[in-house]
Amino acid sequence: MKKVFFLTVFLCVFSLNVDIAQAQQVTHSNTMDKELCFTCHQNQNLTVTRNNQKISLYVDRAQYEKSVHGTKQCVSCHNFKEPYQTGMSTDPSRMSEQCGSCHYQAWSGYRDSVHAGNNMSASCATCHGGHNITKVAGADSPANKKNQVQSCGNCHQKVAVQYQESFHGKAVALGATTSPSCTDCHGAHKVLSSKNPGSQTSEEKTPSLCSKCHGGAVLGLNAVEHYAMTPQGFGAPMYWVKKIFMWLILLVVGFFLIHILLDLFHKLRTRRS
Amino acid sequence: MDLDSAKVYDRWDFHQRFQHWLIMLSFTLLAITGLLIKFAFEPWAQSLAKVFGSFEVLFNIHLMAAVIMIVAAVYHIVYLIIKFSQGKLRGTMFPRFQDLKDLYANIGYLTGRTKEGPRFGKYSYKEKVDYLAEYWGTPVMVLTGLILWFPGTANTFLPRWVIESSHFMHQGEGLLAILVIFTWHLYAVHFVPDYFPMNRVWLTGKVSREVMEHEYPLELERMEREEK
């Protein structure tokens, strides 16, 4: 153990660009203390080359210690099954199981979601972050009400833009707590496709979903929350209304400004003479 | 002559000034809160919105100001009906073909094509435009605003696209009104060299003989005819 420790310290201190290939002697184990991990992993130049790609193995210690898991041991998430291989890395399937060992409910919901079903297209860290995880309610969390639009929008770009045109989107951007954001309608962990009859956003269930805030069920009967502002299709009337008002504003205000300038120049001219 | 030049003329009665107060107050509140919501993704809007404490406070101010504006509009209609029943409604604010001719003549005057400008009555086309903007804008804003305030009720008799379009009508008409007030209206009553820093008629309801001669000569003639 001591030998390993000194070797790691030696490597961290004396080489500026530490590639893990040089440090393969370091045996990771599930009994390692956080302090020992950080002797190497707080080096910003610590990298590993995998498939000809340099991957950083640096962990921002200050940020990690501020996170909700800051007092936990590294090995409580990074479960070493074999030497040199981390338990989680970026493998989503192992990540969700690993998180699920504590966050069981979130994981069991996630297990049934489209995100899990769709080849784990989004896993825990995609929405919550990695070493920097903070409480969801916190201002910095990528999963909080306001920031989740950005987080979900990383993949669901079109829908996020359409949502931001809506009143719900604008209210949330200004910090509203009573206006819905992505997870309020779609769910957080158990996100289901709207084609799935069990989904909150399925055609059958939208009336009761909308009525949570809007009373009566009428609004949900023909709910169209996300639509494209295009000259054809559902968004067409909105597209043209927006266009017409843009031109109306340009023409009216343009005429008024010209009139004001004519008046002003005339007054200044006649005043001088 | 001295007495004459010091003479002031009634222009607006108390009710008219009070309506202006209500509209001014509600319009300002609606414009500020409305612009913040419209430009919710701009950093300046997000930091300004924090002044209100929370979005819910900001939005409730918007709704309360809307109620004040509706009250002012109803007040005005009642005022017009009473004036009409008393036979005192002269319809001086009503747009006429003469206004178009005045506009043409005035542009000729302002560009230096003619030496003499048009002579206006109680309200020139410049003021009629303000009034028209207000009473075209208010119904549009109130109607679309109510649809958005009570979407569930509106949806019982309106198709979805009308409700969705109301968002963009409300934003478009709101922006138009704000830009008109902040260019046309504020120029005409504050920044125009004749009145700078301010035309005080909205406070006193009275105008001087000098202003009457200069701005509303036809109205002055009418008043003097009536006095005789």
Image (spheres, coloured by chain):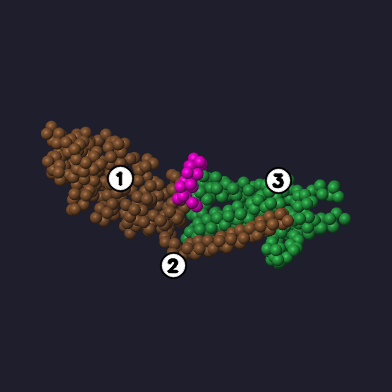
Chain colours: A brown, B green
Measured as percent of width and height from the top left, residue B167 is found at: 50, 57
Q: Is residue A106 above or below residue A253?
A: above
Crowd rating for badge 1 (residues with CA inside 10 Å; few <14, some 14–19, many 20+): some
Crowd rating for badge 3 (residues with CA inside 10 Å; few <14, some 14–19, many 20+): few
Find residue A129 and name its label.
Answer: 1
Q: Is residue B182 above or below residue A1?
A: below
For mark 1, give the secondary structure.
loop
User: Who is closer to the viewer here, A62 or A148?
Assistant: A62
Instruction: Indicate left or right for B43 with A251 as reference.
Output: left
**Residue marked by disc 2:** A232
Measured as percent of width and height from the top left, residue A4 is found at: 13, 35
Inspect this view and state whether residue B68 appears.
Answer: no
Q: At 42% across and 49% down in the image, what residue appears?
A: A180
Q: At 30% across and 45% down in the image, what residue appears?
A: A129
Measured as percent of width and height from the top left, residue A82 is found at: 13, 44
Q: Chain of mark 1?
A: A
Circle 1: residue type: Gly
Is residue B43 located in the magenta-colored stretch of the structure? Answer: yes
Find residue B203 and name its label.
Answer: 3
Q: Quadrant of the image for the C terminus of chain B? A: bottom right
Crowd rating for badge 2 (residues with CA inside 10 Å; few <14, some 14–19, many 20+): few
For mark 3, give the secondary structure.
helix
User: Who is closer to the viewer here, A142 or B214?
Assistant: B214
Instruction: Indicate left or right for A87 with B142 as reference.
Output: left
Give the spatial CA distance, label 2 vs label 1.
Answer: 39 Å
Q: The magenta stretch spans which residues?
A: B38-57
Circle 2: residue type: Gln
Give the spatial CA distance, label 3 vs label 2.
Answer: 51 Å
Circle 3: residue type: Leu
